[in-house]
Image (cartoon, helix red, strand yellow):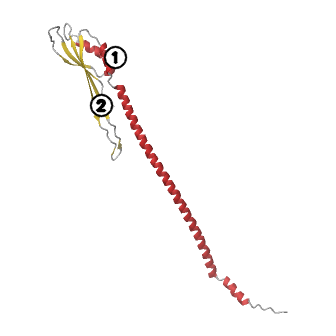
Amino acid sequence: MPIRINLLAEAQAEEEQRRKDPVKRVIGIGVILVLVMLAWASSLQLKSLMARSELGRLERQIAQRTNEFQQATENSRQLAEATRKLESLHRLACNRLLYGSLLDSLQQIAVNDVRLMRLKTEQTYVMTEATKAKTNATRVIPGKPATATERIVVALDAKDSAVNPGDQVNKFKQAVMESDYFQSALGKTNEVRLTSLSPPQSTGGKPFVLFSLECRYPEQTR
């Protein structure tokens, strides 16, 4: 029976032992783990860059929306202010003293022996400045817009030359109070007042008295 001699057996044994060396195996595994970690870190870096880009885009959108909101708020405030002023002007135009209506009403008030000598009107406006909103420890006290209080006084100077001067004064006063215009303009609380009454006098003719009536319109605050 032939005998086989493997001359490379020793070298093969050494090579097999090197392959089974645990140190080399650990090194190989370590290299693989390092490569995996590098790949994972690269993916995280890429995701971070993408997230930062998305964050920047969202921040720009928020800033744009914020600017648009502030502009819309300012436009709304200006519109409300313009609307308030237009309403005030409309109320002023509707409630202003109309001299045509006043003169027409006086022409229709006729009392025997009484002649209207002079018509005087006085219009004054009392301005109240606006107040800003205030905040105290518990609540916010809202501000108030500026206002103007309108005061109108109509004075009627007349002459009574009746047989008994002065007898027609109250009749003329009553006629003014009962006229449709003055009932509407003065309301129930603002009566016609007799402010002056002269003693009987004469200038070479028929005796007469001079008297004055005051019509105070209700105050209007706008």
Q: In this view, does 100 lie above or below 205?
A: below
Disc 2: which residue:
149
Label ID, residue 180: 1
Secondary element under disc 1, as helix, strand or loop, is helix
Residue 203: x and y in percent read 15, 11
Give residue 20's quadrant in the image. bottom right
For the point 53% across and 57% down, the residue is 54
Q: In this view, does 117 lie above or below 1?
A: above
Nearer the N terminus, badge 1 or badge 2?
A: 2
Q: In this view, does 21 lie above or below 166?
A: below
Q: In this view, does 93 lie above or below 208?
A: below
**Which residue in the rendered view is the most extreme toward the top?**
163
For the point 57% across and 67% down, the residue is 42
Residue 9 visible somewhere in the drawing: yes
For the point 39% across and 37% down, the residue is 81
Q: Which amino acid does label 2 sit on?
A: Thr
